[in-house]
Amino acid sequence: MTFVETSKLNLLRRAWLTAFIAALLCLAATALAVAETKSLKGVALIIGQSNYLHIAALPNPANDARDMAKMLTDLGFDARSVTDRDATKLKRDLERFTEDADGADVAFIYYSGHGIEAGGENYLVPVDADVPSLKDAGTSLVPISAVMEALKKTVPVTIMLLDACRTNPFPADAMVRRSPTASASPIGAGGLEPVRGAKALGNAPAADASLGTVVGFAAEPGRPALDGAAGENSPYASALLRHLAAMKGTEFGSVMRMVTEEVYLDTKAKQRPWVNESLRRLLYFGVAPAEPTGDDGLITGERRQLLLTISDLPDPKRAQVELASLQEGVPLDALYGVLKALGTEKIPEDPSDLQKMLDAQAERLKKMMSERAALRTDDPEIKRLIASADKAIGQGAIVTARKFLDDAVGRVEQTDDAVDEAEDLVKQKRLADAAIYARRADASGLVFDYRSAAGDYAKAFSLAEKWDDKLRWNYKNQQAEALNAYGYATGDLDALQHSIEAYRTILNFIPNGEQNRDWAITRNNMAVVLQTIGERETETARLEEAARIFRDSLVVFEREKDDLNWAAAQNNLANVLLKIGERESDPKRLNEAVVAMRATLEKRPRDKVPLDWAASQNNLGLALYALSEREAAGEHLTQAEAAYRLALEEYTREKAPVEWAMVENNLGNTLVSLGIQLNDKAKINEAANAFRAALEVRTRETFPVSWATSRLNLGNALSGVARFDMGTGALEEAAAAYDDALTVFTRQRFPMDWASAQNNLGSIYQTLGQRTRDAAKLEQSASAFQAARQVYVRRKFPLDWAMSHYNLGNTLQLLGGVTDKLEHYGEAIAAYRDALREYKRETNPRQWALTQAGLGSALHWLSMSNADPKTLLESIAARRAALDVLTVDAAPVDWANAQNGIGMSLLNLGNLERTDKYLGDAEVAFTATLKVFTRESLPMQWAFAQNNLGDVSWNRASYGGGKAEYQKAIEFFENAKQGFTEAGYTIPIPLTDQKIDLVKKQMAKK
């Protein structure tokens, strides 16, 4: 545990069936005129390339192709889907498609897979492509321009959508030649470029029957695109699947704009598709699959209008919205939805005004998201409406969210008379109803209906006033803020005065008139309203009163050392002094305003916002890191690493040492996990260095808890380093680090941290005992895991409880091997099975698979003690189950270990049954491990694999395989000896020499 901190083949050629697509084509110049409707033939080819043989595989294209084929079929196309095509098959598919498109009106190609650009040409990458393919790209890859030209001559309208803008899968310095004798060109750094076959048609000859082409890219030219989470669709495919159904009444170009902005929002502005369109006419499709209905239908309808609105926004406004979303930590979709609710014609042109509006609305969104837990109700209809409202806000459908909340309030009012049965029930009902009113008020604020918001907050206050002091304060404060916003926006002085009255009500909540921090914050906010009124009056009395209140607030914030609020009050004081000074001939007040602004800058330096941004990056890294622990592959770890590194660009040791050390600590945890998962020693060493660097700031004297945290995490890194070093130095250093951490993390003061350190210490003793065959170390390991279980009880910490059982099972299994005591294997099996009571494949796939592998290993060794073939078969089944999750790509070392275990069980099963029928499968399993256990990277594991392959050949020879098998066995055993020597692990060498002597003697008798 680590510590993190917050701040199928058909030989018959298939003829294309004619599909009829009801479409409307009208001249672009007369788009408003009534046009003739006719039936058009549409054909589609969908290509999904996932299982690349020599370059990085892609998990999602096969999913994308399957789903796109169904959707296009539903749209009326005659759609054919192919997957994992090599160069020959892919070219044949495209040639056949071009032939069969003859006579059709629309040809539609969707490609999902790798694609590259070089020398101005875009290429589709077949699944058999490798680096040598680049020397003759015209033959080994598929140039897109040729496909476009051929279709242009065959069919009036060609649509090609390329979800192929993924990162270059070839080496960065690789060069591409169109033919072996052509000049070489580098591969584009990211993504594809505009397709040469998609040219403007303004000067096309009249005889050209083509109505044009549409080429859609998953990302902008030269930019890579995301593949999406494994097992799902790519962002581009997801957007197409969601919005192509809108073509029933929406022009195709508008639909593609929806797709573009959907991807943009879904990827949080990291990816934006691009379309090269040269249609001479507007294109509509009239047959569409069923649209969403009910709540989802309302949300989808408003979202589509939102996407079209976003597509019309200029880049500078987009940039402001993106920045506000990032800085405030609110969904990009929702902020854009706020702008749509306002109306594009009312969006402020001045960037500072737009920023102010975005900041205010982002704050409302944050509050709504943070208060979701308060919405407790047992009314299923209200629950549905609230859930739909939350979904609508997340999708940017703000007006629709308001409708759902209107309905929820209506439901509340229908049931209002049924809450007087008992005091406790009344309280629960009133607080739940208050939360609904407050929720609608939040939504009203998002659509700038501050007056309605104020009324709902007042209602929420009246419901909560008697029951909850914190909520009554909160609702009355929100009422005051909404009244101020309404008065500021409309000039309604009565609303502003009511806002002041609301703040004065809040001041009465403070006991004994104490001038504390809450008193200062409330008066500061009241002074902002006074300033707003004062700016609209001819006299300066209210402005002077506001200035006095700001100064009073500064005294409290300074005393409380509340720098953030001090800076806000100082900024407000500067503003009111400026307003007064503008009305006076004497520049005194203006000078005071300047001094006040400079004082504000001392607490709000230029790097204030970047540091806030860095804090957000750090926290993003923590969330990604936690998710990865529940995954099979942990694909989010690299994103977490990137987030931490971005934070460190602002959190430098010189500028913010404490924050820098915190992020170094968190980065180290991610690097350890990545290094272990990817078998990357360099990353684990980098992690250890990160922890050591953090400890230079986090000294025990100054930051004892942080020091203990980083010492514990350093132990984790050293434990990872020990995987690559057969000595005990790193392990002993790790044990010392854990012992240090335990001097701070006592069970009484830090029970969870204490248990985590005990667990990790148990892992170190486990590895030490394994390498030294020291039963005492293994007993220490078991004791540490059992100690951790004193805190990790199943009812409170089910996953930690399961982890301790899994770890204990590993230790007991090793102890059985060292002591030759059969009971330890049985105890290990019981521990693994206990772990599997909580580890489920559906929710904890990686932990479940590792436990299955451990169970298989313990069953194997138990079978060796009792010579039970049934137990061996159970072992093989458990390990094969583990391989469903532990793939060679996602978890190479664990995959190889499971393969090795299967081979050993098969080998021993053959010995027990006195048959050679399992030798072939055993050999396959041992050979598979060599994909991971290479001599260079893991010499000890490579040596064991060579030894096991030697056993296979020796057994085969004993069953009549002949002299050649004996020779192979000797070669494998000699290789094993060399590997053990290179790894510095000499214990197995004498036994290997004995095997070689026995083989030679048996061979001499033949």
Image: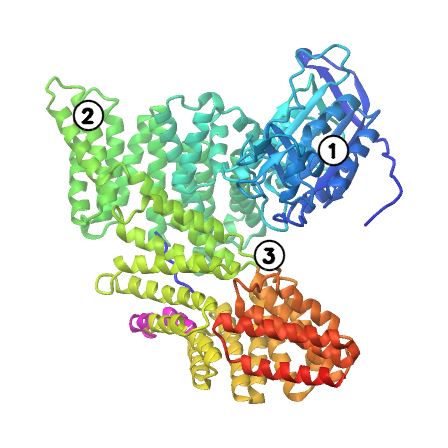
Q: What's the amino acid at mark 2?
A: Leu
Where residue 126 appears, as percent x and y from the top left, is: 69, 42
Query: Which portion, as a residue range, is magenta?
Result: 740-760
Q: Nearer the viewer, residue 817 or 942?
A: 942
Where residue 440 appears, as percent x and y from the top left, is: 47, 40
Q: Determine whether, in the image, residue 207 is placed left or right of residue 671.
A: right
What is the chief secondary structure element of the magenta stretch? helix
Cα distance between the residues tagged 1 and 3: 39 Å
The figure's colour scheme reads rainbow
Quick check: marks 2 and 3 in contact, CB under 8 Å? no
Quick check: marks 1 and 3 in contact, CB under 8 Å? no
In this picture, is 348 found above or below 400? above
Q: Determine whether, in the image, residue 317 is placed left or right of residue 133.
A: left
Q: Which residue is mark 3?
A: 889
The N terminus lies in quadrant:
bottom left
Give the mark, 1 or 2, whose residue is nearer the N terminus. 1
Q: Which residue is mark 1?
A: 288
Q: Determine whether, in the image, residue 646 is placed left or right of residue 263.
A: left
Q: What's the amino acid at mark 1?
A: Ala
Q: Residue at x 17, y 36 (%)?
A: 599
Cα distance between the residues tagged 1 and 2: 61 Å
Q: What's the amino acid at mark 3?
A: Asp
